[in-house]
């Protein structure tokens, strides 16, 4: 059935509402990849709980503001109302810069949307369960009870909205942060999950655009800081709030994008039109990029892989290195090419030279390498000073080529005696679609390690078994799945 349209609303608002209000037609590959994304994101979230800078932000907004029977935050004993639960889980997923990613004119991390999706699904499922045993719902209607297949479907849609909008619209180039698209995508799918009509989805998504966008200044010198690690949690939390308000009957703003002077396009996008590069389907989930081996900003993933390959050739001659040449793409030149002092972990994990220096020095890269104790090693700064970073035009072209979507880097090390290492080039990172089959086993190992830092081995084993059985996983109720993830 064709959903009833609001013909006066901006076309983009209607197309988003059409997409989430219609039955999802997604490929088997998209669902298979979504299962990996759910597993990987959960593992990243659990690993982040080992970081005090992350955990200090979690829990209720004020002490004691818990909600028995509310959404459960994985790896914790928190039960919260869904807005704050979304902030908690969204922040955890994103904290270590280790979750899946998407590179285009606007980059981002579509799994950030899980903060809204999984917490809303758990809250609705638990509310529905409780409603069947109480008289608390005056309208006599039960809330829906979700299974993991429903979560995967919502993920595919949220990934698609965020990713397709990112293909040709560079919000970062006007100073706005990519979490804007997390808020838009999460608002759309969450409103629909809550039972919203087509008109209510339009209203809610219009509110998401009216909110404008966070400034990217917290990702760049001289203001690089930890907000980049909780900005997605903030965006996905706001999405749940906007969805709930729209379900309560709050009005929308039909020309929030196109209104002259005051609309998003004129006021914040320099008069440019927001375009959809392709129809909504399941393209983004099929093409998603995983961070398999190390937590590093994705434009530098292949550089770190190249550096680790070179470790054995340089580890015994570090004092005799004269020059290190890194060839990269234009996006890396603009985003993560940094010289000079690095102030904090958020600065270091977005510095191409620092990540390469760690790989050359240690033959590995883990989250702890960004912390102050590891960064105090003077050899890292010395290696950084020896680096020259240049753009390779072919890498930049093939980065934008929709048939290739490479993220290439190459590294070569030169020594005082005139000798040099091989020039090591890596065009596609391990988590790329072209290396998906190669990535599956390392992704499973990554999950086991990450989840094992917070949950008992027996529970991790049960989850791994569940993720290995697609039919059983899809049919698992969200409430049952969540019981495996939380502290008793």
Image (cartoon, rainbow, N blue to C red):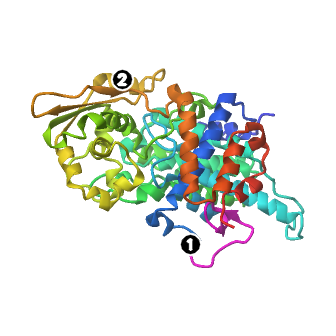
* Residue located at (64% from left, 47% from top): 188
Q: Is residue 483 left or right of residue 63?
A: right
Q: Quadrant of the C terminus?
A: bottom right
Instruction: Find out whether residue 65 is within the magenta segment.
Output: yes
> Which residue is farthest bottom?
64
Q: Secondary structure at mark 2?
A: helix
Instruction: Find out whether residue 438 is within the magenta segment.
Output: no
Residue 393 location, quadrant: top left
Q: Is residue 395 left or right of residue 149?
A: left
* Residue on which disc 1 sits: 61
Q: Which stretch is magenta?
A: 61-82
Rate crowding at label 2 as few (under 14), some (14 to 19) or many (20 or more) other CA atoms within 10 Å.
Answer: some
N-term-proximal mark, 1 vs 2: 1
Rate crowding at label 1 as few (under 14), some (14 to 19) or many (20 or more) other CA atoms within 10 Å.
Answer: few
* Residue on which disc 2 sits: 397
298 or 246: nearer the eye? 298
Question: x and y percent of residue 412 in the render?
Answer: 24, 30
Query: Is the C-beta separation of discs 1 and 2 under 8 Å?
Result: no
Q: Quadrant of the N terminus?
A: top right
Question: x and y percent of residue 92 in the render?
Answer: 53, 57
* Residue located at (43% from left, 23% from top): 401
Give the Cα distance between marks 1 and 2: 46 Å
96 or 424: nearer the eye? 424
The image shows residue 122, relative to residue 61, as above or below, that is above
Main SS type for the magenta part?
loop
Can see residue 172?
Answer: yes
167 or 482: nearer the eye? 482
Question: x and y percent of residue 199 in the render?
Answer: 71, 47
Residue 325 location, quadrant: top left
């Amino acid at each position: 059935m064709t959903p009833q349209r609001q013909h006066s609303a901006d076309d983009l608002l209607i197309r988003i509402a059409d997409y989430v209000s219609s039955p999802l037609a997604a490929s088997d590959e998209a669902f298979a990849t979504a299962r990996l994304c759910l597993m990987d994101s959960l593992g990243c979230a659990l690993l982040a709980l080992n970081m005090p800078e992350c955990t200090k932000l979690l829990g209720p907004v004020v002490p004691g503001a818990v909600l028995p029977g509310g959404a459960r935050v994985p790896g914790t004993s928190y039960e919260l109302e869904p807005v704050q639960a979304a902030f908690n889980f969204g922040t955890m997923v994103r904290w270590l810069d280790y979750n899946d990613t998407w590179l285009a004119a606007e980059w981002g991390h579509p799994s950030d949307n899980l903060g809204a999706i999984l917490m809303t699904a758990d809250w609705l499922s638990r509310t529905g369960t409780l409603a069947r045993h109480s008289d608390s719902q005056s309208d006599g209607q039960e809330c829906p009870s979700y299974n993991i297949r429903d979560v995967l479907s919502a993920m595919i849609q949220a990934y698609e909205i965020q990713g397709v909008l990112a293909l040709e619209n560079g919000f970062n180039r006007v100073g706005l942060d990519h979490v804007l698209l997390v808020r838009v995508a999460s608002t759309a799918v969450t409103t629909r999950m809550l039972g919203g009509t087509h008109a209510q989805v339009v209203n809610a998504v219009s509110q998401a655009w009216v909110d404008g966008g966070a400034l990217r200044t917290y990702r760049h010198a001289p203001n690089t800081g930890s907000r980049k690690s909780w900005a997605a949690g903030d965006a996905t939390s706001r999405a749940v709030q906007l969805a709930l308000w729209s379900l309560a009957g709050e009005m929308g703003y039909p020309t929030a994008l196109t209104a002259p002077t005051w609309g998003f396009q004129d006021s914040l996008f320099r008069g440019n039109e927001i375009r959809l590069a392709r129809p909504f389907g399941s393209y983004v989930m099929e093409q998603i990029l995983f961070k398999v081996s190390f937590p590093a900003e994705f434009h530098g993933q292949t550089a770190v892989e190249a550096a680790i390959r070179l470790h054995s050739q340089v580890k015994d001659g570090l004092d005799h290195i004269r020059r290190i040449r890194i060839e990269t793409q234009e996006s890396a030149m603009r985003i993560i090419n940094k010289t000079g002092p690095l102030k904090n972990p958020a600065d270091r994990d977005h510095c191409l030279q620092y990540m390469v220096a760690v790989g050359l020095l240690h033959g590995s890269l883990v989250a702890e390498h960004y912390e102050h104790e590891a960064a105090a090693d003077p050899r890292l700064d010395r290696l950084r000073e020896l680096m020259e970073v240049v753009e390779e035009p072919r890498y930049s072209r093939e980065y934008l080529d929709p048939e290739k979507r490479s993220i290439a880097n190459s590294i070569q090390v030169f020594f005082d005696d005139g000798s040099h290492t091989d020039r090591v080039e890596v065009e596609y990172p391990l988590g790329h679609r072209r290396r998906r089959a190669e990535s599956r086993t390392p992704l499973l190992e990554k999950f086991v390690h990450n989840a094992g830092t917070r949950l008992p081995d027996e529970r991790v084993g049960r989850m791994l078994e569940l993720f290995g059985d697609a039919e059983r996983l899809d049919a698992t109720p969200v409430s049952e799945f969540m019981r495996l993830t939380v502290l008793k």
